[in-house]
Image (cartoon, helix red, strand yellow):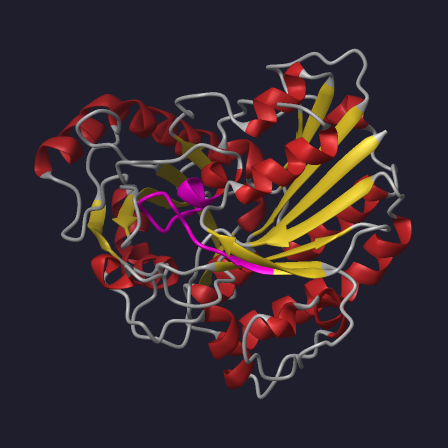
């Protein structure tokens, strides 16, 4: 049985796109290279083996004269620099019109609709903010009023944070579902994000495992759908199911962070998961002859990129690197591994938002011919390689 494993290191860009100024980003943004420099060099011997160091001057990862993989840099065709746009383009859904952003907060009429439909009584904040900071600033008032904390960023997101000891988790998810129904058409928001947190030792702590992303549904079939239609299964690990609103995802498992995501991905490669327990409600697969394992590792973005923590970001990359030998060893000749990213989030430049960047792509299989991949002008190169491996159209 042929398999493809795609691991997305969330936000690990490798240099500004030519149009970065249109997205208010500086040409110096380069998440991977700047993180490596801030960390005084990355210890990533397995990414070195795949040829990552041949793509740029990455401190700690030298150029490899005899790489074991194929390596290249992908430019983004779609308009945007967010999770949905990047992942959709990988699966051959190109956005001609970007999702809307709200640099001054959401308009009064939108907020009024949200308050009316949710019956929440009111909201707090409503401006672009770092999630940890806005929760710290409004927690006391949130506890008194029981109003949800609403905020956005430079990306197309409507984020709702609540202390789940103040507002139950189920109510937060209900708020998000209602917000998702409102934020279509004229508002055109990419994602509604549930941001549950609890107070731990007097400080608010977000609960990554309970985060949920409510994305707009893909407007056409993705490569995931095509795999399902060709007697395959698609296992989404991390927030993949949320990004595609379940469309084209036959099996799914949410994760609380990178370590869990890496362990589950390794178990999937080793065929140690009980797939019957991971079936989604949308699809009932009886038999299959191909498998697509699609993993998002979010910590680089959520915990470190947005929080300007270059050290934490570097250590997260090094942790990912440490899992690669186990993945390599458990791959068969029928397996193809692709490692890439969906956008940038350079923690070393001004701001806390995503950066409009190119992304690396590393490809490995047991019998692959190592080479530099040139002139990749769209993230849908990933889709093309998957279809070629599975011999589907």
Which residue is nearer to you in this view: 391 or 235?
391
> Which residue is located at x 47 percent, y 36 percent?
88
Which residue is nearer to you in this view: 230 or 204?
230
Residue 312, x across and y down, in percent: 56, 73
Residue 115, x across and y down, in percent: 20, 30
Q: Is residue 369 left or right of residue 227?
A: right
Residue 210: image quadrant is: top right
Q: Is residue 292 left or right of residue 382?
A: right
Q: Is residue 294 left or right of residue 345?
A: right
> Which residue is located at x 38 percent, y 26 percent?
177
Residue 226: image quadrant is: top right
> Which residue is located at x 29 percent, y 47 percent?
149
Up-down relation of residue 17 to residue 247 (above or below) = below
Q: Is residue 360 magenta?
A: no
Q: Quadrant of the C terminus?
A: top right
Up-down relation of residue 148 to residue 118 (above or below) = below
Q: Is residue 49 left or right of residue 367?
A: left
Up-down relation of residue 242 to residue 208 (above or below) = above
Residue 154, x across and y down, in percent: 27, 54
Q: Quadrant of the N terminus?
A: top right
What span is in magenta?
72-86
Up-down relation of residue 246 to residue 137 (above or below) = above
> Which residue is located at x 59 percent, y 54 percent?
340
Q: Is residue 246 visible?
A: yes
Residue 376, x across and y down, in percent: 50, 52
């Amino acid at each position: 049985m042929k398999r493809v494993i795609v691991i997305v290191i969330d936000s690990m860009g490798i240099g500004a796109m030519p149009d970065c100024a249109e997205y208010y980003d500086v040409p110096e943004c380069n998440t991977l290279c700047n993180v490596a420099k801030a960390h005084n060099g990355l210890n990533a011997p397995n990414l070195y083996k795949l040829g990552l160091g041949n793509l740029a001057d990455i401190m700690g990862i030298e150029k490899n004269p005899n790489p074991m993989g194929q390596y290249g840099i992908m430019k983004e065709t779609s308009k945007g620099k967010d999770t949905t746009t990047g992942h959709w383009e990988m699966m051959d859904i190109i956005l001609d019109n970007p999702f809307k952003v709200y640099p001054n907060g959401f308009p009064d009429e939108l907020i009024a609709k949200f308050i009316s439909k949710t019956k929440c009584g009111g909201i707090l904040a409503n401006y672009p903010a770092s999630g940890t900071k806005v929760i710290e600033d409004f927690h006391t008032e949130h506890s008194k009023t029981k109003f949800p904390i609403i905020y956005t960023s430079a990306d197309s997101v409507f984020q709702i944070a609540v202390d789940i000891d103040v507002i139950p988790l189920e109510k937060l998810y209900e708020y998000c579902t209602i917000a998702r129904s409102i934020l279509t058409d004229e508002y055109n928001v990419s994602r509604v994000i549930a941001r549950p947190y609890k107070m731990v030792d007097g400080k608010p702590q977000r609960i990554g495992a309970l985060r949920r992303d409510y994305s707009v549904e893909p407007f056409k079939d993705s490569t995931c759908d095509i795999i399902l239609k060709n007697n395959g299964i698609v296992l989404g690990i991390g927030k993949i199911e949320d990004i595609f609103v379940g469309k084209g995802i036959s099996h799914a498992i949410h994760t609380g962070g990178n370590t869990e995501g890496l362990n589950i991905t390794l178990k999937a490669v080793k065929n140690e998961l009980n797939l019957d327990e991971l079936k989604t409600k949308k699809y009932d697969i009886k038999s299959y002859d191909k498998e697509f394992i699609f993993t998002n590792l979010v910590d680089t973005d959520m915990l470190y990129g947005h929080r300007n923590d270059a050290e934490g970001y570097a250590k997260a990359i090094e942790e990912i690197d440490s899992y690669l030998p186990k993945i390599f060893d458990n791959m068969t000749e029928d397996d193809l591994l692709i490692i890439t990213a969906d956008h940038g989030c350079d923690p070393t430049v001004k701001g806390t938002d995503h950066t409009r960047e190119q992304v690396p792509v590393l490809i490995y299989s047991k019998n692959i011919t190592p080479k530099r991949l040139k002139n990749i002008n769209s993230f849908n190169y990933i889709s093309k390689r998957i279809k070629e491996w599975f011999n589907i159209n």
